[in-house]
Image (cartoon, rainbow, N blue to C red):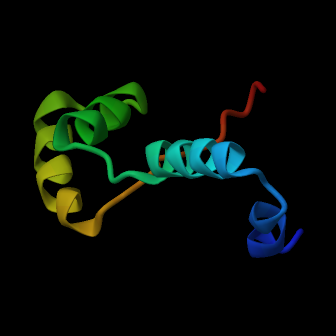
Amino acid sequence: MPDIRALIDTYTPEQRTAALEILDACTRPLQVREIEGLLRLGGVSRSRAVKMAGTLKHMNLIAVIGPEQANG
């Protein structure tokens, strides 16, 4: 993996600003409704997803993944 700091130091000020804006957008914590929606897409019932999202919101999640699907 490249040294991120060294890579960013090679960017122009405009490139650096754009890269940091993208990084901020990709790593912001998910909102409760986003967590709930992702859990629902994963097959969790609505009532359970609401409860789980309420609990998980304090963890500042940036992604919800899995389980992997067997059929590819």
Q: In front: 34, or 10?
A: 10
| Residue at the image point whose x is 42% and y is 33% from the top | 42
| Residue at the image point whose x is 19% and y is 51% from the top | 52
Taking the view exactly as shown, the residue that stands out farthest to the front is: 13
Image quarter of residue 14: top right
Q: Answer left or right for 18 relative to 4.
A: left
| Residue at the image point whose x is 20% and y is 57% from the top | 57
Q: Is residue 66 visible?
A: no
Where residue 15 appears, as percent x and y from the top left, is 70, 44
**Total number of numbered labels?**
0
Q: In front: 22, or 11?
A: 11
Image quarter of residue 35: top left
Q: Answer left or right for 70 relative to 44.
A: right
Which of the image's four quarters has the N terminus? bottom right
Q: Where 21 sits versus 61, above or below?
A: above
Where residue 21 appears, as percent x and y from the top left, is 51, 45
Q: Answer left or right for 23 relative to 25.
A: right
| Residue at the image point whose x is 20% and y is 40% from the top | 49
Where residue 72 appears, as percent x and y from the top left, is 78, 26
Q: Answer left or right for 65 relative to 13.
A: left
Q: Where 40 sits versus 66, above or below?
A: above
Q: In front: 70, or 57?
A: 57
Where residue 31 appears, as percent x and y from the top left, is 23, 43
Q: In front: 51, or 10?
A: 10
Taking the view exactly as shown, the residue that stands out farthest to the right is: 2
